[in-house]
Amino acid sequence: MVIMHPTLASIFKGKDDLYPSALEGKYSRVFNNIMKYWGTPKCDEYLEELIVDKRGGRQGVSADVAGDIVRLSKVHQRLLEVRAAQLAPKGDPWKNEDVRRRLSNEQIEYSMAGFWQAVETGNDRALKIFLQIVGVKPDEKDALGAPALIKAAMFKRKAVAAMLLESGADANLTNAQGLTALHWAAFKGFADIVELLLGKGANAGVKGGPGVTPLMQAAMNGHGAICSQLLAKGANVNEPDNDGMTALHKAVSDGHPEVVRVLVAAGAEREAKSTTGATPLSIAERRKNAEVLAALGG
């Protein structure tokens, strides 16, 4: 039976295997500091410093001690979240001094501007406070009509995107131009975010704006691996935009032979005509791009 510190006894009751015995036994001074600060924002700061040190390669910290520190940090964050929720004035989630202090520690403003700052900078700790305590909706849109998930995709904030999706964000929500987060992730070449979105139900063949698909966005920017991801999830390789241009037209126009090969292998039609009568083959011939012509088989 593990003899537990009184501060943690109720938390780890019946969970001896989760109690930070390694930390307490090997680093008593550090453990006692955590207990001294427990339940205060100072404890969050102290634990975060320890985690950063550990990730930075602190010598002599074993895996069991590192695990204890990370576990205590998560437990403590949850404790402060529950406490903040209990202290929040009814009817006004924007007047919570504990939340204000915690966001200040993250250098995030206690406002909707702060929410967008957390999304864009990838501060998932602050974002969690806004979503779970303040009650900001995960599908919140900015002044220009861009949902938080699209902003996360644009700025390559995978942890933020994952948290928004877990909180109920619609993976297919569009901005004012009719584009989704998947359009942006494909356009930017962020394969890990594309994978995340597809795994959470994003439509691989969604059309937005002037009829463009994520496959077209990836193709025009030379992201062959992302084209393969989208095709594997059912994207139509021959889908045209409003001008009759397919992903292959765009890959050829922008000179991406590696993408052309991916699309041709998936059944892309090299004689598909746009509204002006242009085909991928005619575009390649006009531009005299030998690599693209070879990829087309022409």
Image (cartoon, helix red, strand yellow):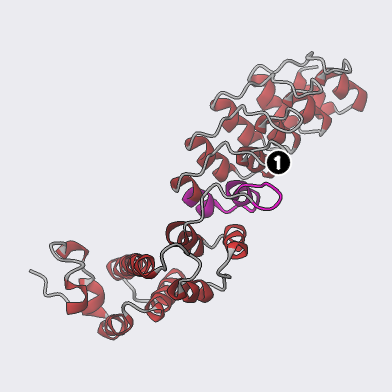
Q: In which image quadrant can residue 271 be found?
A: top right
Residue placed most toward the observer, 280 or 180: 180
Name the residue at the left extreme: 1
Q: Write the start and end of the magenta stretch as one range.
A: 142-163
Above-or-below relation of 4 to 215 = below
- Which amino acid, by three-letter code, is at mark 1? Ala
**Residue designated by label 1:** 176
Q: Is residue 148 magenta?
A: yes
In the rendered image, residue 248, in percent from the top left (x then y), is placed at: 74, 24
- Which image quadrant: the N terminus? bottom left
> Is 183 a magenta residue?
no
Query: From this viewpoint, is residue 135 visible?
Result: yes
Q: Nearer the viewer, residue 175 or 6?
A: 175
Quadrant of the rendering where the C terminus is positioned? top right
Relative to residue 297, is residue 124 depicted above or below? Answer: below
Looking at the picture, tell me which residue is in the foreground, 63 or 95.
95
Please give left or right for residue 270 compared with residue 122 in the image. right
Residue 166: % across, % down: 44, 47
Q: Is residue 237 above or below residue 185?
A: above
Q: Position of residue 261 (x, y in %)?
A: 69, 25
